[in-house]
Amino acid sequence: MRILYLHQYFATRNSHTGTRSYEFAKKLIEKGHEVYMLTTDTFLAGETPYKEEKNVKYYQIEGIEVIAMKNNYSNYMGLIKRGWSFFSYMQKAYKIGKKMRNIDIMFSTSTPLTIAIPTLRLQKKLKVPFVFEVRDLWPEAPKQMGAIKSKFILNQLEKLELKTYQKADHIISLSPGMTEGIVAVGIEQDKVTMVPNLSDLNLFDLEKNYEKEQREWRARFQLENQFLLLHLGAMGEANGLDYLVESAKVLKDRGREDIKVVISGDGKSKPRLERYCAKNRLTNVIFTGHVSRSDVPMITGLANITMTCFKPVPILKTNSPNKFFDSLAAGKPIIVNSDGWTKDIVEEYGIGHYVDPTKPEELADLLIQLEGQRERLAILQPKIRRIAEERYSAEKLADKVERILVETLERSK
C-alpha cells in the first residue's frame, strides 16, 4: 500500500514527545508498504532535511518520506496562536497532499481535530478511503477543560467531529472511554477499533547499562539515595501538576524531604509550579526541563515509582497517556490519580496505586508508606514488563493497525 499519513506533530526519538506515529510508520515500512508523512517541523529539530523549500522541509527517516511544513507551535501558546498554527497546517497540508499521486489509503491522526479538515478535502480530491485515529475526544476535552467557551466554535467543532466520524471508512480509538465517546454520538460500534498507546520495548532495553549517565544525573540534581517519584512528559493544564507540588509541600511539612518529586518536561504550567516551589522552599521538587526521547529509559530507571497525573475532569479519564505505557515498558510501578481505565489496569494487575486527585495528602501518605517498600517495588519489574510485552508492544499494535488499513482498503474496492 501507498499510505498518506497525516499527523500534525510527528516526532522521532530525537525529540522530547510521543513517537506513536513514528513507530507505526516504521513497522509499516518494514512490512513492505510506502509511507508519506504530512506533518510540521515542530518536533523535527533533531533531524536533517535532505531538501528545503520556502515553507517545506523534506526528510527521509528510516524509509519514511516526511514532508514537513514550517510551523511554529508551543505548549505555551494561547488559544488564538494555537488556532493560527492549526489553520496554517490545514492549508499547507491540503496544498501539498492534493498533488500526490497513486495513494491507496489515508491514515489521519488527531489531535487537533482540525486535522480532519485537510483529511476530508484530500479524501474528496484523491478519491481514497481513510482511517481516522482519535487520540483525544474533541471538542469535549477542551470544552470540559474550559479552553474553548464559545458556543459557536464548540458547535462547529461538534459538527466537524460527527462529519469526520461518518465520512471515515474506519476509526481507531486509544482507549475504551474514547470508543464509548465515539459511539455515543451515533457511530456504529463495529466501525471503531481500539488500539491503545504502545510500550516501546526496543527503546526500553532493560539489559542496557545506564550507570554512568544515571550517576551524572544524580550528581547534577543532588539525588543520592532518596526515594524518587517521577512524572515525565507534558506540563500542560490538563496534567494538573499542582497536585504533585502540593503533595511535596505536605511531605516537607512532615519532615520527609528525603522523598523527592522529580518533574521532567516542559509546558505552560511550569513557571507557575516553579514559583509555588520557590515560595514554599520546596527543595524536594526537582524540575529537570526537557528530556529527549532517547534519554527517557535512563531517567525512568532512576525512579522508584512513576506518576500519571491529570486534573479531576471527567473527559480526562479516557486518556491514553504515553508516560503510562513508558512506565510499563520500563517495568516501573505506577501511581495514577485518574479514575478511568488506567486505574483499572493498575488495580487489575496489582502494579501500582490509585490516589484521589483532590487530596494531595493522600499521595504524600502513600509515598511515605512506599519509601519503606523499595524492594517490593523493585521486584515488580519483570511482571510489569511482561504486561507491556503481551498487551502493548509496538510490534503487536502495529500489526493491528496494518490489518485495519488492509481490510479498509479491501472493503473500499
Image: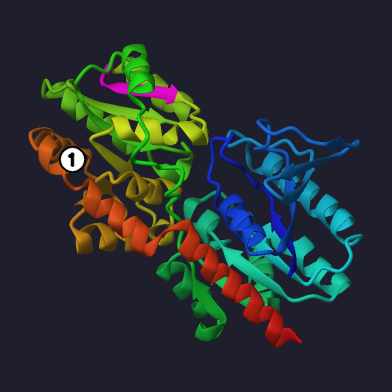
Kindly identify which residue carries mark 1. Answer: 378
Q: Look at the image and give the residue range highlighted in magenta.
A: 281-288
Q: Quadrant of residue 176?
A: bottom left
Q: Nearer the viewer, residue 62 or 42?
A: 62
Query: Residue 5, position in %: x, y?
Result: 71, 59
Left or right of 348 on screen, residue 174: right
Left or right of 207 on screen, residue 197: right
- Give, as a three-letter code, the residue at label 1: Ala
Is 346 drawn above or below residue 171 in the view shown? Answer: above
Is 286 drawn above or below residue 323 in the view shown? Answer: above
Residue displayed at 32% across by 34% down: 301
Left or right of 287 on screen, residue 35: right
In magenta segment, residue 211: no
Query: Residue 199, position in %: x, y?
Result: 42, 52
Quadrant the N terminus occupies:
bottom right
Q: Quadrant of residue 3?
A: bottom right
